[in-house]
Amino acid sequence: MTQDPFLSRLELARSGARTLANAPTVRKNAALESVALAIESHSPELVEANARDLENGRVNGIGDGLLDRLRLDADRLRGLAQAVREIIVLPDPVGEIVRGSTLANGIRINQVRVPFGVVGAIYEARPNVTVDIAALALKSGNGAVLRGGSAAEQSNRALVALIQRAVSEAGLSGDAIQTIDDFGRDGAGRLMRARGYVDVLIPRGSAGLISTVVQESTVPVIETGSGIVHVFVDATADETMAVDIVRNSKTHRPSVCNAAETLLVHRDAAARMLPAISRALLERDVVLQGDDRSRTLVREIGEAGDDLWATEHHALEMGVRIVDSLDDAIAHIDRYSTRHTESIVTQDYANAERFLAEVDSAVVMVNASTRFTDGGEFGFGAEVGISTQKLHARGPMGLPELTSTKWLVRGSGQVR
Amino acid sequence: MTQDPFLSRLELARSGARTLANAPTVRKNAALESVALAIESHSPELVEANARDLENGRVNGIGDGLLDRLRLDADRLRGLAQAVREIIVLPDPVGEIVRGSTLANGIRINQVRVPFGVVGAIYEARPNVTVDIAALALKSGNGAVLRGGSAAEQSNRALVALIQRAVSEAGLSGDAIQTIDDFGRDGAGRLMRARGYVDVLIPRGSAGLISTVVQESTVPVIETGSGIVHVFVDATADETMAVDIVRNSKTHRPSVCNAAETLLVHRDAAARMLPAISRALLERDVVLQGDDRSRTLVREIGEAGDDLWATEHHALEMGVRIVDSLDDAIAHIDRYSTRHTESIVTQDYANAERFLAEVDSAVVMVNASTRFTDGGEFGFGAEVGISTQKLHARGPMGLPELTSTKWLVRGSGQVR
């Protein structure tokens, strides 16, 4: 055992995680129910700890939007307990036999799902992420080392202490869940370099946070979230469908990563459909910026700024561009997309199939709103995040994406 | 397009890779056959280029072992062409539908295998790796950027030029395969930081090389190869089986990563079996070092050095330790293993199952030689490497491990 207090914390998470790794599903579920009950019964203390964060936030001049995301009240805590119970009913990925065969020499090999070990998470502001990640880690048999934003330090400390107690009361090791918020900024940096102590690191938050983790981490990272998402309205698109899909993709929840940022319209559809699509967006207060061709068709479209196509607005703003062909649409996407989600609206079979085959994004759609890129919508039941990298997991991540595999080899004395 | 000659090279690989990504299997196979034929028909030029590397190696005082691994002759080139043909007959992983379902709203979702895009490889000395990785990349629809050791620069340059020509002659883009050996040491460093240009980086070579890549790369890495591999002879082990498995695990091919380095023996089996096991190893010229208890039983066992248990010998040397229990064996493995392969020799069902469940390595075996951790033995047919990390791939990697996935979503106008 190390003397270093930071590494000791990580070792504690790992030794706690060992008790989870082979725990039967019923015991992990009992621990989760214990966590849900504890959140409900200790609601007043949690609200009080959160109040200290809110007060500090006001003193430090944090904006209203951020303060709202930081806030825990009795209602939100009930929601958090409910989210934990939704994880209880999900199938346990651990122990699933992924592949297996009997070799010619009689050796039987089985590839089975196992927990990673310890999952690290670096995230900002929202204390619900603390419960979210801890519960997903518990269900998948992993320990978790959590580094939340300093703005939520009191809330996160109270939540982690409560989770540790609840897990221990259910007979598993509460040590598996640890916070390193008390190590301050230095803690995040050390976590990124804790290869061998932490098996995978998941950043959740702003593009800046994610990029820092990707650049600096020696622990394997799963990159999530950033979404410059495109909808392409093809020449043959049905007008009603195009209006519905563009409006829904942009305005249903503009602050999230699967909201569309850029509308591409085929030149042969532009005169026919861009006015109606623009009207539908303007009615929902979307600010439009576009290229010259789109601006001659719709005068409410403003001039495109230099970095428009590379900007994730997270807001009711949208870029509009008219393209000459499917190839031009794909080329635009290839240049500017963060490879999260793109959708084509078309009635043309060949174009639909080409778009699906040639666009290199985690999720590629035909005639559907980009808002469907979501673990819940895909039927995974839990939100680990949406991976925009190609290694290990791509697109919406469910519990199986929080596991690794190992090969079990059963022989009867075979040698080579 | 960038003006930087290094990044231009990477962009060339990516644009070449695009022609492979959706190429039908028959065309990729034709390109591979074209490569195999070219290796055979240009054998004299390749031997000549290799002769220049051998000459430089002699001038620079490279050892005989390394010179032998560097050598290409007509026989070895025929073997290389044969290895390419073995990849032709493997199933194409691209396009495989991994999962799929129809959502309640009628949207159909399919998760399909797609190429990564561009695979980077950093490796040492052996020019056969150049052909190996290029052929595996071609079959899986990926481009490849290759950084071989400077010792093989002439051989690698000749091989890559030949591969590029052969792929182009078969009607695909030879640009997909690139070498960056001409950028010298700087090239390896830049490749590690080429996130966005290269999708995954696979180091193959010494532990030092792999550790450098893991520490410095911002491109996602698949860590391969390092193997401190254990065989544990349990109290109930069958003596003949124990002798066979330990001997085979250690001596069948001591230089490779799945060769055993450490023998753990249960104290209740030690007096009965350690003398016979040691004799079998000594007969094969294995140098044994061990703890005090093993040395009192077998006087040929030398004193264990300080870092014995953490050393991968790659040679006919083995550490021997007597442990008091299965728990002690697992604890030793947990402390010293590189989590590659471990095997238990036992007749006890419960101990076998506990070892399989609790040892956290890529491959965990009962009553089998550790030498079976191998893509060929597992029936994968091709040697991409053996992953010792938990993200994306673990254990022997086949062609599917050189792919990512994407989700195809087919709707009929659905919105949320």
Image: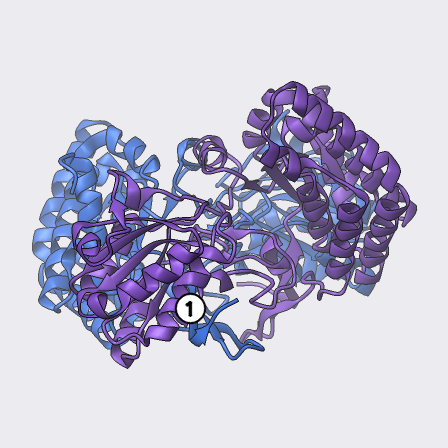
Chain colours: A purple, B blue
Image quadrant where residue A408 sits = bottom right
> Looking at the picture, how far across and down is residue B318, in whole percent?
60, 40
How many circles with numbers are drawn on the protein?
1
Q: Residue at x 8, y 55 (%)?
A: B44
Is residue A274 positioned above or below A261 on the image?
below
Residue B261 in the figure: left or right of residue B273: left
Give the chain of mark 1: A
Whether residue A321 is visible to the viewer of this picture, yes or no, is yes
Q: Residue at x 28, y 33 (%)?
A: B190
Q: Relative to residue B27, is residue A204 drawn left or right?
A: right
Q: Assign a secondary structure to mark 1.
A: helix
Q: Which amino acid lies under the numbered mark 1 shown in the image of this protein?
A: Asp
Residue ID for mark 1: A244
Q: At x 23% / y 70%, what residue is drawn?
A: A272
Is A351 left, or right, of B356 in this rendering? left
B22 or A246: nearer the eye? A246
On screen, residue B214 versus residue A275, left or right, reads: right
Q: Is residue B381 visible?
A: no
Q: Nearer the viewer, residue B240 or B52?
A: B52
Report x, y in % for residue A83: 73, 55
